[in-house]
Image (tube, grey):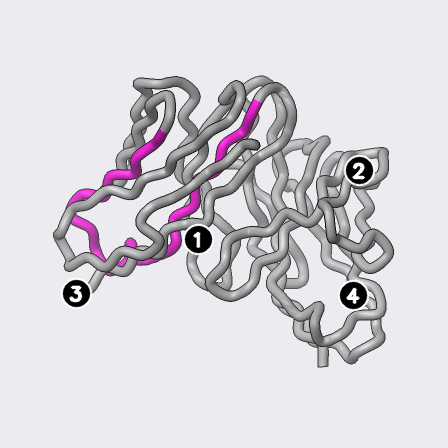
Amino acid sequence: GAVVSQHPSWVICKSGTSVKIECRSLDFQATTMFWYRQFPKQSLMLMATSNEGSKATYEQGVEKDKFLINHASLTLSTLTVTSAHPEDSSFYICSAATGGSTGELFFGEGSRLTVL
Amino acid sequence: EDQVTQSPEALRLQEGESSSLNCSYTVSGLRGLFWYRQDPGKGPEFLFTLYSAGEEKEKERLKATLTKKESFLHITAPKPEDSATYLCAVQEGYGQNFVFGPGTRLSVLP
């Protein structure tokens, strides 16, 4: 299957700092990428849909200014958690769709963010 | 409203004890139904895509089937390494919208 790489896999930062997470589709071009947040023992919560060359579409309740998403190329989307606070600590996962009429969705390995 | 539900929420099996996981959906215009496996602390791993009722796909001890209202993930003679959370998702219409179910946590005891 297609490969989606996410980096870093874990990060620890101090409260008030910003953290950037990268999501790359390694062997296909992805016009659309998705960012999820996952709490322990819960399912994926869609945060936003990232479209190459345009503004991301955020789900209701997700702060656009807190979670900045940039999809500058067909293989890279980034999520920046700005002015992070301990309540932002979570597992963040990206996915990319292969597109077309039978497009499939592949996930990155996830990034564990801990804000001290 | 499009919905995806999964049952049971959690399932404990003895090694070798076959069973099935259910994914029920209500969407307008199913484009594809996806099964994923997720291990703790990892991103979901793609297993299968099913596109039309009656379709079946197999991979090792797993077999996925699809009807117009639900999908089953059959696990034959499971092993402890099959322990994971299994997620299903549906893609509707012609957009890129994927709706995920809450998952089934499977534990296979040796």
Who's the residue at 46% across and 29% down the image?
B26
Q: Which residue is at a point 63% across and 66% down the rendered structure image?
A: A90
Eye-nearest disc, 4 or 2: 4
Q: Are marks 4 and 3 on the same chain?
A: no
Residue B46 visible within the image:
yes
Label 1 to label 3: alpha-carbon separation? 20 Å
What mark, if any, has residue A19 been given in the picture?
4
Q: Quadrant of the C terminus of chain A?
A: bottom right
* Residue lying at 38% horizontally and 35% vertically, measured from the top left: B24
How far is the residue under mark 1 from the one under mark 2?
Answer: 28 Å
Chain letter for the residue marked with disc 2 in the picture? A
Which residues are the magenta region?
Answer: B70-92
Q: Main secondary structure of the magenta part?
A: strand
Give the residue at x 77% y 35%.
A51
User: Residue B41, position in %: x, y?
Assistant: 50, 63
Give the amino acid type for the residue marked by disc 3 in the picture: Pro
Question: Which numbered dot is residue B38?
Answer: 1
Q: For the residue labelled by badge 1, is the local secondary structure a helix, a strand or a loop?
A: strand
Q: Earlier in the sequence, mark 1 or mark 3?
A: 1
Question: Are the residues flagged by discs 4 and 1 from a single subunit?
Answer: no
Please tell me how crowded label 1 is: few (under 14), some (14-19), or many (20+) other residues with Cα within 10 Å.
Answer: some
Return the x and y of residue B90 as percentages of the image width and height. 49, 32
The amino acid marked with disc number 2 is: Ser
| Residue type highlighted by circle 4 | Val
Nearest to the observer: residue A69 or residue B11: B11
Q: Specify the farthest residue to the left.
A: B16
Identify the chain of the residue marked 3, using the numbered disc in the image: B
Q: Write down the chain letter for disc 1.
A: B
